[in-house]
Amino acid sequence: MANIKILLVDDDPDLIIAVQTILENKGYEVVAAYNKKEGLELLLTEKPDLAILDVMMEGTHDGFELARAIKQIPEYEKLPIIMLTSVDSITGVNFKAAMSDPNWLPADEYIDKPVEPNDLIETIEQVLAAKADKR
Amino acid sequence: MPQLKVLVVDDEPGILSGIRIILNDYSVGYPFLDEDFTFETIESENAEDALRIIENSKPDLILLDNKLPGMDGIDLLELISDWGFEIPVMMITSFASLDLAVKATKNGAYNFVTKPFTPQELKAAMESITKHLFLRRMTQKLNQEEKQVRFQFLSVLSHELKAPLNAVEEFQQLILHRQAGDKLKDYDIIVNRSIDRIKAMRLLINDLLDLTKIESGSKSRKIEPVDLVPIAQQLIENNRTLAENSKIHIYANFPKELIYRADIREMEIVINNLISNAIKYNKEKGSVYIELQDLDQEIRLIIEDTGIGMTEEEAAKVFRDFIRIKNVKTRNISGSGLGLSICKKIVNLYGGQIQLQTEVDKGSKFIIQLPKKETNK
């Protein structure tokens, strides 16, 4: 557990502080970025084991675009991605339901903001376990 | 050139060809239109054929004779509206009986032309119905656009309102689950940041109210002679603490007095937004320069800072709703993203304009020009 590194991308510095606190408390190492571009740069330099991405940053779909960009890098094709959303009610898109569509967004899980600490940790553990199973 | 498809339904070949010839070299123009409307005729001798043409070719206008073999013009008119085709119809009648006129209008005919008609009479009727069609289409388009703009505004607004709630709730979760430590002191940062977010949310709501007030029209506006000098001085004082936090010096260059006919609250909003922006987006130990000028035709408010400035791309969109320039330098600056949009809307109300000169890392200069109209002299 101690060696797991998580990339956290959110344009809201307070959400970064909060989520980072939760993750570090659980022993995860966290690297944080505030936008799509920084996120991609950190991915390449920090080589995280999992990414947690906010959906709506500068652009309304930046999180999705970043997720797609990540999955296009062969090395990170299988990187587990958790999306943090607060946009369901606006877009009317049920992200969880849409996940069954293979052409849909390349994320493993979706969590609605605000995040409940135990939910987040549980989801991370599940996603990491699923990845370990596939190997 | 926009060409309108006109379906002409009449069982007299002479009328059909007459209308075709008249409309072929007739066009309708309006001073506010770049291009004139011209007409292309499609002809039909009975109502049954006409229906098929309406379904397949979707004409823009219909000229319809009442007396037709088989189905009557009036009945066709009723079918057209029953089937939901929104096509303006001009009735062609041999004699304008009141009965027929009433019935046709009830069934949705826009106007009449009586046989026999002169080319001038037909052209006058065409001009009227074309104008009607144009205005109806414009209105539909504007309504659609307005709905879209409003939806977009509400989408972004709800996101902007949820963001601080999310942050504060997230912080509460940290406290509830003792995520930051066992001592109360461990949570100082979190509590302080929560308070900041709540304050920022209150500012957003206030800005939103200002925006609504401006957009709802002039009901609550009170235009009267206002001396802008003491207002600006007071607003500088109000922003003093904010400036001192970053050791920013404010220089003011004001005339003795500057009387302008305006709504005092609107002037306060504009000046305050620009002053607080100039401080917020400044650098440590930077300066803010504020000047009021009383010119012949206009008054000017100039606010210049030595702050972080903007790129051309950022400057181009900074006056739009909910635009906040997001980069490393602005990350921890709070704002609603409505301030400059509100300023611009207010300045527009006075027929004035805002100029922005800005350079990254050098600073920004906002020049507001407000014309002295007749009432302002």
Image (cartoon, grey):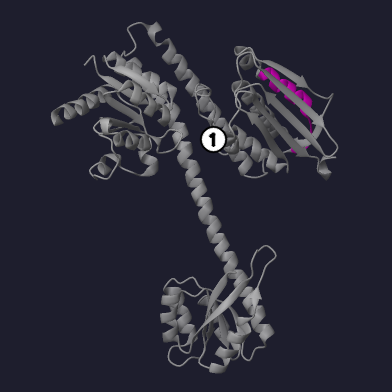
Q: Is residue B171 visible?
A: no
| Closer-to-camera residue (B58/A78) | A78
Residue ID at (52%, 53%)? B145
Picture mark count: 1
> Start and end of the magenta stretch?
B223-238
| Closer-to-camera residue (B338/A28) | A28
Q: Which residue is under mark 1?
A: B323
Whether the magenta-drawn stretch holds residue B235 is answered as yes
Image x and y of residue A86, in percent: 37, 34
Circle 1: is it few (<14), some (14-19), or many (20+) Cα within 10 Å?
some
| Closer-to-camera residue (B12/A133) | A133
* Residue extending farthest front: A74
Q: Is residue B244 above or below residue B362?
A: above
Answer with the quarter of the image where residue B41 lies: bottom right
Amino acid type of the residue that numbered disc 1 sits on in the rendered structure: Ile
Quadrant where the N terminus of chain B sits is: bottom right
Q: Is residue A35 above or below residue B136?
A: above
Image x and y of residue B43, in percent: 50, 85
Answer with the quarter of the image where residue B185 lies: top left
